[in-house]
Image: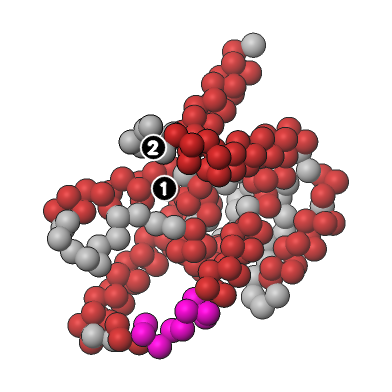
Amino acid sequence: MAYGALAGLRPINGLYTSFFPVLAYFFFATSRHNSIGTFSLASLLFSEPINRLTLQYYNPRHPSNSTAMSDEEYAFRLDLALTLAFCVGVLQIIMALLQVGFLAAYLSGPLISGFMCASAFHVVASQFNYLFGIKLPRVYGPGNLLLKFYNLCTHITEANVATVVICIICIVVLHVFRMYINPFFRRKLKFPIPVELMLVSVHLQLIVLRHNC
């Protein structure tokens, strides 16, 4: 679900991305190059052209200050995502036919490590709207990371306190389970405790109780 939001789409698209590649893996399990899921860096790279083209060419009929994505904007973004996924697939087939995979051998370890470390800052900055419950101006191009932090500082007084508290609690719980609880029960349990699913379930239950009261 987080990967769907990180890619500039809806969380349900993250569930689709996690489900259908597994079906492909069922038939192509002997392939060493078959990917059965996504990760934050791929979602972030995927969101960059979608957000940029949406900002340039999408004109909403009913502008809103809400952080939620309208159905009209979602349809526009989904068309861009499908087109981008198709073009990337065609490009990968062409690269496989030309056997240009050897170029990856020229990427040094420090280069890849630095790239992955820097991408973590971009991933965090892309989630400011959701972490603080505010709608920040969209910025792209060189220096956009610094502009995102600047926009956060100028709009921090508009943050939703309840959203911030929930995010802090979830981050603390995830960190405690990952660093302490799951390693402690690793020898006793054959699978890790699904704390992410537990948090989502508790959050949904609280929403249902809030609306029923």
Q: Residue at x 82, y 52 (%)?
A: 155
Residue 40 is one of the magenta-drawn residues: no
- Name the quarter where the C terminus is drawn: top right
Identify the residue under disc 1.
13
**In the image, residue 211 lies at what x, y percent?**
61, 18
Q: Residue at x 63, y 52 (%)?
A: 127
Query: In the image shown, does 72 or 84 lie closer to the viewer?
Result: 84
Amino acid beneath label 2: Arg
Q: Earlier in the sequence, mark 2 or mark 1?
A: 1
Query: In the image shown, does 202 or 46 lie closer to the viewer?
Result: 202
Asked if one can make out residue 10 in the rendered structure from this viewpoint, the answer is no
**In the image, residue 76 lies at what x, y percent?**
48, 56
Where is residue 186, by image quadrant?
top left
Q: Is residue 14 above or below residue 142?
A: above
- Name of the residue lying farthest toward the top: 213
Q: Residue at x 49, y 29 (%)?
A: 198
Q: Is residue 144 above or below residue 179?
A: below
Query: Relative to residue 84, is residue 133 drawn left or right?
Result: right
Amino acid beneath label 1: Asn
Magenta segment boundaries in residue numbering: 104-112
Near mark 1 (Cα within 10 A), the count class, few <14, some 14-19 or many ≥20, is some
Q: Residue at x 64, y 63 (%)?
A: 121
Query: In the image shown, does 196 or 52 lie closer to the viewer?
Result: 196
Q: Which secondary structure type mostly characterizes the magenta part of the structure?
A: helix
Query: In the image shown, does 104 or 45 lie closer to the viewer?
Result: 104
The CA span between labels 2 and 1 is: 34 Å
**In the image, residue 138 lies at what x, y percent?**
67, 62
Query: Relative to residue 171, is residue 1 drawn left or right?
Result: left
Identify the residue under disc 2.
187
Pointer 2 with pointer 1, Cβ within 8 A: no
